[in-house]
Image: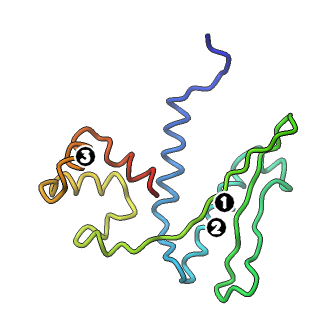
Amino acid sequence: MKNHDIDFAVLGGRIKEILYEYVKIQSFTNTEKEREIENFFENHFNQVTYFREHHEFWGTYPLENDPLKRNVCWAMVKGKGKRTVTLVHHYDIVDIEDFKTLKSFAFSPDQLRKELLLHKDMLPEDAQKDLEEDTFCSAVEAAT
C-alpha cells in the first residue's frame, strides 16, 4: 500500500545530481578553497522552497579564531512532533595523491568509473567486480 506521493527513482536521481555537484568542489582541507563548500550549501538552500520560506532554519556559524574564517553550515526541517532528528555533516577533502594518474578524475565519479574500467586489472578482485556491476561508484559516493 502506497501512502505517499514520492517517486523514489526521481528522488534518487536528484540526490545523485546534488551529490555530484558537491563532490566536484575541490575544497582542499586547510586552504581558502575549503570555504567553497559553504557557497555550495548557501546556493543549495536558496534553491529549496522550504528554506527560502524559512530563512531561520538554515545558515552558517563562524568558527572562532579560525585563520581561514570558515563557518559551520547548518540546516533543519521543523517537523510536527516534539522529537527532533539532527543530521551533522563534516566536510573536507582528503588527499587525492592515491589516485595517481587518475587524479584529474577524483572529483567526477562517472568519469572516474570509466577510467577505472580501462585500468581495472590494477584493482583488487572485489573492486573489479563492483566496478563491472556498476556498484563501485555507489560505494565511492557513500564514502564521500
Residue 137 shown left or right of residue 27 in the figure: left
Toward which corner of the image does residue 59 lie, by quadrant? bottom right
Q: Looking at this rendering, what residue extends furthest in the top direction?
A: 1
Looking at the rendered structure, the kind of residue marked 1 is Asn
What's the amino acid at mark 3?
Answer: Leu
Which residue is labeled 1 in the image? 43
Q: Above or below — where is 65 with respect to 98?
A: below
Helix or strand or loop: what does disc 2 sit on?
helix
- Tell me: 47 left or right of 21: right
- The image position of residue 123, as x and y in percent, is 18, 56
Query: Which mark is on residue 131?
Result: 3
SS class of the residue under badge 3?
Answer: helix
Q: If you read the primary sequence from the N terminus, does the residue marked by circle 3 or circle 1 appear first?
A: 1
Q: Residue at (45%, 62%) from the top-left corner? A: 24
Looking at the image, is 61 positioned above or below residue 118? below
Q: Which quadrant is the N terminus positioned in?
A: top right
Q: Name the residue under label 2.
A: 39
Residue drawn at x 76%, y 82% is: 64
Residues marked 1 and 2 touching at CB (< 8 Å): yes
Q: Distance between the residues labelled 2 and 3?
A: 32 Å
Three-letter code, disc 2: Asn
